Image: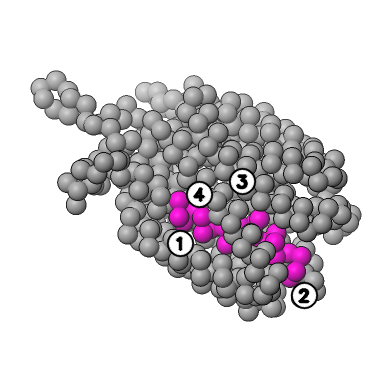
Amino acid sequence: MYKLLNRLPFFYGWTVLFAAGSSMVVRNSAASLTLAVFIFPMSEDLGWSRTLIAGAASLGGLVATVASPVVGWALDRYGARVILTGSVLILGLSTVSLAWATVPIAFYLAYGLGRVIFSSPLNIGPSVVVSRWFVRRRGLATGFLFLSHSLGMITFPLIAGLVIKYRGWEDAWIVLGVLVWILALGPVSMLVRQTPEEVGLLPDGDPPKPQAGGAETSAVTEEQNWTLREAARTPTLWLLAMATGSLFLLQSGTNIHQGAYFLDQGLGVGVSAATLSLNAVFTGVGSIFWGWLVDRVPVRFTYAGVALMMAVALILFPMADTTVEALIVASIFGAAVGGILVVPVVAYADYFGRRSLSAIRGVTEPFVSLGQAIGALFSGIVYDVTGSYKDAFLVLSILGFATIAMLLATRAPVRERQGIQIG
């Protein structure tokens, strides 16, 4: 098999990227934009508040904070192919079961489980395996990976909306669950490999470097590889984790309520759906742009630019009361979301290397899950108390500007003989 992969007319890493991307597409069955399509019909049909429905996403996020370190360990122990295959099977089952979740406890169990899969194995696994297959082109490859996620962000809410319109929200959950299995189960179970070295290749498809005496070595031997214990001793790890959690709090507090917000603005179902679609489209555009940029600009400056764009978008949301304004602000916010998906993934790999990346991502991902849990619940509570999302957007924008300062304070970790410091 190794000889076959070496004879392919293209680098096998692109095949791994495709397979990992299929899992990123289907994880959107539990995404906030997909749930946003269901909030209005489910609340009307079942008499549930928006806070109750959004709370299921928060519960899943909280559980994911506990699950992520275990998932990081399992990815190193059992390999990405096994973990991703099991995750796709479970996600499809939990999504289908939502068709019968007509009491809150059943809804929380089913959607919460899907949200754990979304936030943990189907977030850490695909990005880690792509970061291991690419080094020089890591930003661009990660951008394409999250372009796959944005394709799911576009298609899954649209499919859900169409099925809800003609068949009802129960059948919509069934359709999404079956799509999870159809689109991703084959690719992740057959094509994913843990590292290029596992199949006799090198990252980016690079040839071995000839050395003195006829020996050959990898083109990436200069890459530093930190253990989890070493990384945990650096302020860089925790600054990056806290900033990322903060930005995902902004993302969840906005995305999951965006559709309902524009309906409250009196812009109609068509405009509301269009803003969700544009959000997803520009998340894909942003993924490629920020992935391209982070390969060329120091990661802390790139990431601060992402935070600035997101904070500005949140200032604009309360001002958007026409169709054009709603479409513009949703597009800006979507582009920023593309950045928070791509840039931290690249940062962790660039700063700490490939060897212990799963474990490192496992202990930092709870900040993301916690941020998503708090954001979804925060905006729902503000709406239920005040009857508007505008105060929520104001608070979230302030948090976004504070995060910029945190990101600018982040430095690449540097090893010294007597310890570890930030250089």
Residue stretch in magenta: 21-42
In the image, what residue type sits under mark 1?
Leu
Circle 4 sits on which residue?
148
Residue 103, horizontal then vertical, whole percent: 70, 78
Mark 4 → mark 2, Cα distance in angstroms: 33 Å
Q: Secondary structure at mark 3?
A: helix
Circle 1 sits on which residue?
183
Mark 1 → mark 3, Cα distance in angstroms: 20 Å
Q: Which residue: 67% across, 75% down?
A: 167
Circle 3 sits on which residue?
281
Side of 15 where 246 appears, left or right: right
Q: What is the chief secondary structure element of the magenta stretch?
A: helix
Q: Earlier in the sequence, mark 4 or mark 2?
A: 2
Residue 379, horizontal then vertical, whole percent: 77, 53
Numbered badge on residue 45: 2
In the image, what residue type sits under mark 3?
Val
Residue 343, horizontal then vertical, whole percent: 54, 36
Colour pattern of the rendering: one colour
Numbered badge on residue 210: none
Q: Secondary structure at mark 1?
A: helix
